[in-house]
Amino acid sequence: TIPTDSNNIIISDGDGNNRLQFSNTGAATFSSTVTATNFITTSDKRLKSNIIPIKEGLETLKKFVSYEYIKDKKQDAGFIAQEVKEIIPYSVFENSDGYLTMNDRPILAHMHKAIIELDKRLSAIEEELK
């Protein structure tokens, strides 16, 4: 079924569960697995403001835990949004059902910074050993 209102187009399954929702803001919400060949994210500097380098990658990442768990009867791995929200609040959102959702890109950016920090430490140790 495809019920619509002034704000959304909703596609539901035969049991009345919303499976796909398009909002008038252009956002799409899927309530199941999404498979695609590639996901491309807009990242042009001209679309960003207040650009500040991340200061602490490793220390930030050490403040929350990565887990393995069962979700939707499938083995998965990742983070707990409530924990991440305490450390990187702009990466966590609440959906219309009240569940927390996450954007993994801020975590990826902190991982990048952490790798650079670890590389710097490793280079210093290698220099000392010469």
Image (cartoon, rainbow, N blue to C red):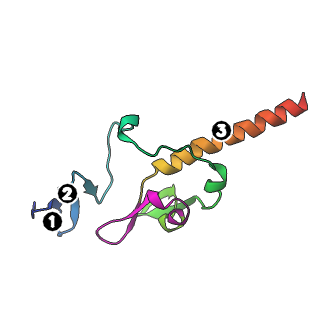
Name the residue nearer the viewer: 13 or 84.
84
Q: Position of residue 20 (x, y in %)?
A: 22, 57
Q: What amino acid does circle 3 point to?
A: Ile
- Residue visible at 49% across and 68% down in the picture: 82
Instruction: Look at the image and tell me whether residue 98 can be seen.
Output: yes
Q: What amino acid does circle 1 point to?
A: Gly
Cα distance between the residues tagged 1 and 3: 50 Å
- Judge left or right: residue 37 versus residue 114: left
- Residue visible at 51% across and 56% down in the picture: 77
Compared to residue 12, the image places residue 117 above or below, namely above
Compared to residue 45, the image places residue 84 above or below, namely below
- Residue visible at 61% across and 43% down in the picture: 113
Q: How many marks?
A: 3
Q: Which mark is residue 14?
A: 1
Give the extent of the magenta segment.
84-101
Q: Which mark is residue 23?
A: 2
Question: Which residue does the numbered mark 3 point to in the structure image?
Answer: 116
- Give the mark nearest the N terminus, 1 or 3: 1
Q: Secondary structure at mark 2?
A: strand
